[in-house]
Amino acid sequence: MGTKAIFRTAMVAIAALFSNSMAQSDYTEALTGLTSSQKTLDMVYVKGGTYTRGCSDGDNSCVEGEKPTHKVTLSDYYVGKYELTNAQWKAVMGDNTTANNQPKTSITWYDAVEFTCKLSKQTNKKYRLLTDAEFEFAARGGTKTKNYRYSGSNTAGDVAWTSANAGNGYGAKDVGGKAANELGTFDMSGNVYEWTLDSWQSSYSSGDKTNPIYRPTAHTQKTRRGGSYDQPATGSRVSARKIRSIEGKDGSIGLRLARSVSDNDPAAQINPCGITQPFPSGAKIGFRDLRIATADDEAWIYDMSDYNPGMGYVLRLSPNGVARYAMIMTFNGNQMVTDQASGEWYTTNGHSLYIVPSSGTEKRYIYLPLCRESCDNMSMMPEAGMPGRYERMKLSDFSGASKVTLPSISSPKTPENLANGKTNIDMANPPKTGHDPRVKEGAGYAWIQDNVKMGAGGTHRYRKDFESDDKMRFIVWDPPSTTLLAQGPWFTVDDSFLRVNDPNGATYDYLYTVTKNKDTLYHISFQAYEPGDFRMFMKTKDGDVPAGSEPASNATTYNQGASKYIPPSTNGTMPTISSSSKASSSSVAALSSSSSRASSSSVVSSSSRASSSSVAASLSSSSRASSSSVAVAASSSSRVSSSSAVLSSSSVEASLSSSSEVNTSSSSEGDETPILSQIATNNLAVQIKNGVNLQVASGAVVEIYGIKGNLIKRQNYKRGVYILSLVNLPKGMYLVKVGFGSDMKILRVPVM
């Protein structure tokens, strides 16, 4: 090799080394508005590596949530040097937060994610929350670890603010007030808890993992890390972790920033701007709640992989009334599907789902869908059974879900006939006389959820007492505090809905069920503090109730926000969402966890997908369509006809009418012109980019809906092949319903 070649080779090597050193340096993100006395937004480089996550050797304080230990390999990433401060938050969010060096607290998980979204947009860098695995690795000191019990020391007081040293005033302290750990990060033990991206797992799954992240976009309980000023030091150990309601917020939880070095890191592929908080919505009055209907390629999935790999429940509810609910489990490498219910479905009161088999007894399920522009999360429990958290997913995104095929119904019934005399109660003005005797615990007993005994990821316990028809109370105690969550007169409706009228003027609403032996009470909450969260209360003798301080006799209910319950109405009601919290319609989030991967045909966040449930057109008895027509009624005074297959943004949006019917079985008026006329021999409707590829063997009716259920266009198609382009519509998600005679297909089409 010549001298020049050797020189060039050396220069390339030096340049590469210099480039790597630059890429692997700590840095400061400049924020406008910070003063010289306020902490800068410093990011610390963490070199990736392999470590053992979970209970440390010799640590006798570990709980179930820290087991089993397992090897984790992480890629390089950056971590915030400090917990995010109030001043840094204000600099980005521009709100009225007091600018100081204390950690920003009293934020929900969604608030924390929204901050990372705004910071990412301002800096053109991909900021996010830490994953659970990244937090522990950094807290342990990364590859520089000295295997301390706490983050930087074996003595908690050296590195952590806890209940032992925070003083009588408690409260968060200025960040960086204790010693740093091996990486140079502060307060990864103590001061305040920190949100992570991961959903809660009651225990780890075994086996080695690379860049693990558990259901990051799921609307469910999340994992918090680090301990806090109001908790004992054991909660600040490097392996300690706790559960937290996703909407929970108080003065002891904040966030710490993270950023991936490589865009191939699974956590880097999650777009925080595509994650939006869902809320309870209101059903349309009727016997088939289309908020929970699933498209042909969808199902509601209750992922239980953290309990048993490959295990989950799959619920399919076609808009035309066919249903199947099954459990999937992998045993010795073989996947088994076990039916729970199969047949036809209907709903009552906007929260009770019934599946009616061809023979035998119908089964009831009590549900609460959570929605934004669409309903993609749902809490549901079988009557007398335990609740679960369901996500609307593509069948292809959960192993084995496609095996749960819908049954064939030879003589389908209308939902009214299936209801067999049941009626819908006026839930806007519910009767107040019901007092379900099953919820009354009886003298000498209390309803208790003991998170400590259950190993549910916390030190708090819940208690319910139905002392009389005029008085109930619901409390939580987490030493050293006890908090009233609800109190006052109560009543029940339909043996499934509980309302408490609190003296503070608020109402507190829950769905509930009781086991057949009456020893367990389950509830799903409508409360602003925790919509969709559920609890499990065991009937417990007074003498066996764990010790806890009683609230004062004149104690008032904690101001957590009143019920978010919306009763069924004529047109249905989506939740009201402030414009400041709406995500951009162009936000696209690629899901990377094994349980919530997005399909290549529609890569969007599971919390912001539009769906068939966004059509608020459940069929009431006054708007039934015949089985040979598309089962959606549209106002005859606002039909839209067009000779073009391309829809423009100026298309008339025909509102749905609950009192009119449209008979499409013989209509041929306004047929479109096919690009190929006599080629089609089979019916086919396939989503393509910004449109639909349509193949019609004889005739079809197509209806296009906006995300609020508004009918945009309705068109007949004769035999032929068509390209339906939606490209001129505003960006967003649309529902396309294609009726081939009595066969109906539903597609969700994003326009980007």
Image (cartoon, grey):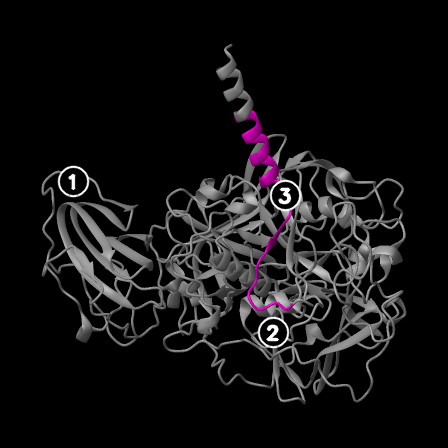
Decide which of tag 3 and tag 2 comes sooner along the chain: 3
Height in image: 587 above or below 266? below
| Foreground tag (3 vs 2) | 3
Asked which quadrant contains residue 627, the reply is bottom left
Question: Where does label 2 land, which residue?
Answer: 527
What is the residue that sits farthest to the front in this orientation?
3
Height in image: 607 above or below 591? below
User: Whole-percent x and y of residue 545?
Assistant: 86, 68
Crowding at label 3, few (<14), some or many (≥20) Cα neighbours within 10 Å? few
Crowding at label 1, few (<14), some or many (≥20) Cα neighbours within 10 Å? some
Height in image: 158 above or below 531? above
Checking the image for residue 25, the label placed there is: 3
User: Whole-percent x and y of residue 177?
Assistant: 80, 62
What is the residue that sits farthest to the top in this orientation?
1
| Foreground tag (3 vs 1) | 3
Q: Nearer the viewer, residue 132 or 696?
A: 132
Checking the image for residue 680, the label placed there is: 1
Asked which quadrant contains residue 511, the reply is bottom right
Magenta span of residues: 12-35
Height in image: 593 above or below 706? above
Query: As shown in the figure, which amino acid type bears the numbered disc 2?
Result: Gln
Q: Give the side of residue 228 with respect to residue 26, left or right.
A: right
What separation in Å lies between label 3 and label 2 (alpha carbons)? 45 Å
Decide which of tag 3 and tag 1 comes sooner along the chain: 3
Is 30 within the magenta? yes
Is 654 within the magenta? no
Observer able to see residue 107:
no
Decide which of tag 1 and tag 2 comes sooner along the chain: 2
Q: Quadrant of the C terminus?
A: bottom left
Secondary structure found at label 3 = loop
